[in-house]
Amino acid sequence: MMNVLLVDDEPWVLEGLRTMVNWNKYGFQICGEAENGNAAWAIIEDLQPDLVFTDIHMPSVSGLELIGRSMQKLAKPPRFVILSGYDSFDYAKTALEQRVEDYLLKPIDEVEIENVLEQMSLKIQNELVSEKLHQHERTLYVNCLFNRLFQGEDSSELQAEVESLLQMEGHENMACLLIETDSCNEEIQSHVQRFASDHHYEFFMDAEGRMGVFAAEIEDSLSWLERLGGNLFEMYSDHASIIMAFGYHSGGVGAMRTVYEKALSTLKWKRYQKGSGIFHDQDLPRNGSIATVNQKALTNLFRTILTGEEDGLERGVQELLANPDRGLPVSDIEYVRVQLLALEMGVLKQLKELDGDVDRFVLQLQPMLGGLTDIDSYPAFREYALILSLNALRALQEQRKEKECSTIFRVVQYVNQEFREKLQLQELAQKFHMNANYLGQAFKQQTGKSFREYLNDKRIEEAKRLLRQSCSSIAEVAVHSGYPNADYFVSQFKRMTGMAPSAYRKQL
């Protein structure tokens, strides 16, 4: 519903407007009434109505003064309709100069005012649709710019474009608020976007779907961004797990990547600790290495676990819990905790992907492992990692044997991994030593879809992800999702989603 404010110093006029007009019929609701210009201005500032009906002659501030003040001080002033008992050319001329929508003479005619409402409803709704489309296109543009910065691009052209966008000339200090939540995403996003727009900050979504806000001038932005963080936590912490992290740095546009990475490191660190709330990059322990996972060592240990090589576990654990630069055990407890939390998360993810019972696995291990946050010595961490790795190896082996007894499961897994390649049912049948007709029937029984339907669904889902999370061209998205022919990709995407890829990207 659109909000309308009624302003007149005669109570009987307000009562008449309130009762004789069917506001709901035209999509309006009365958000307030005022008998003088000062009271009306306070309501306009607070509620930002879409439409105002106002008398001209009122105490303290006239209707024309109220309109002038709104036009001068508000980024988006409401639309105004004048109510007047004076059929004066001068008043009408002044009103038109101030872009008033209409000029109605008292006593108000019901049909006349409803005609005005019908026109205003259409105008305002068209404007809202246009603004929403513009905002969406601008958000895509901003996301592309920022993600190019985050990925390390540092051309002078890109920096100048971002500096112009943020109106950062002369501003050295940067602040970034990064938000991660498991639910209420659309509602929180809408709230954050409104806040950013009101305070001339820049809202963005990073490649992993986290929400963020950039602000120049740290002294001014800190209090407002922290107020936003506090409001979000107060509003949503009872309904969602929400983590917010702040990063600060100086250096203008050149500092934006650093600011983002500081906020991201803080957010990841608190997520590893299973924390929620609002955190600053200053909250991180000062040793910079502790905020990162030793990905190489973690990958090697996972390879050992997945291949079932029990003899290699001890060496894999030792590499994971060592300083990646020196290859020696580190004394920093928090660094080691991060590595083990990453290992835990990876094990549970692998088990879940094989449809294993994650809860049962955790309950079985709990008596042996205890709580990771209670451990404070390297030998205890090492023992924890060995027990976790050995049990993970055996649980994953057992689960894989249950699943791999079905050849169809292996076929589906193969399609899930290789869907971007050229796949044919006949070739799969040869690869897995099966009759092609039987494979087609069994595949549909296992997945609920024919082979071709399943393959297209996988490719279109990948295309959707690329359209959401990257700035790649439609042709590039087509190739990376398994469609070498861009025209064929567009036709398949339309057939399966009801819209073109470009339209899908715009509506996000």
Image (spheres, rainbow, N blue to C red):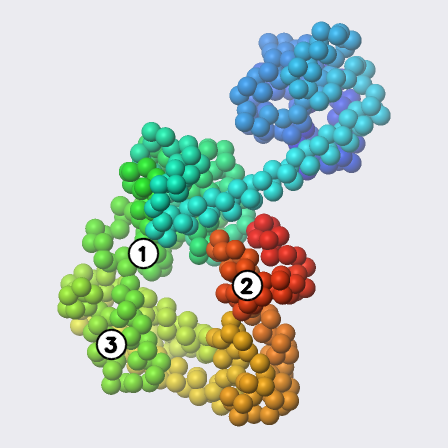
Residue 146: where, in percent of width, then height?
42, 46
Q: Residue at x 60, y 71 (%)?
A: 456
Q: Is residue 487 left or right of residue 479?
A: right
Circle 3 — which element? Answer: helix
Q: Which residue is mark 1?
A: 269
The circle on residue 316 is: 3
Q: Residue at x 23, y 65 (%)?
A: 336
Q: Amino acid at mark 2?
A: Ala
> Considering depth in this image, is 61 or 476 the residue closer to the camera?
476
Dividing the picture into quadrants, the one containing residue 98 is top right
Residue 498: where, in percent of width, then height?
68, 59
| Residues marked 2 and 3 touching at CB (< 8 Å) | no
> Considering depth in this image, is 181 or 320 the residue closer to the camera?
320
> Considering depth in this image, is 149 or 211 the residue closer to the camera?
149
Circle 2 — which element? Answer: helix
User: In the rendered view of the protein, which quadrant contains the N terminus?
Assistant: top right
The residues bearing labels 2 and 3 have C-alpha atoms spaced at a distance of 39 Å
The residues bearing labels 1 and 3 have C-alpha atoms spaced at a distance of 23 Å
Up the image or down, 387 lies above or below 274; here it is below
Dividing the picture into quadrants, the one containing residue 293 is bottom left
Q: Residue at x 79, y 14 (%)?
A: 106
Q: Which residue is mark 2?
A: 478
Dividing the picture into quadrants, the one containing residue 304 is bottom left
Q: Amino acid at mark 3?
A: Gly
Choose the circle earlier in sequence order: 1 or 3.
Answer: 1
The residues bearing labels 2 and 1 have C-alpha atoms spaced at a distance of 36 Å
Q: Is residue 138 left or right of residue 117?
A: left
Up the image or down, 460 lies above or below 55; here it is below
Q: Residues within 10 Å of mark 2 (few under 14, many from 20)?
A: many
Q: Is residue 410 left or right of residue 441?
A: left
The circle on residue 43 is: none
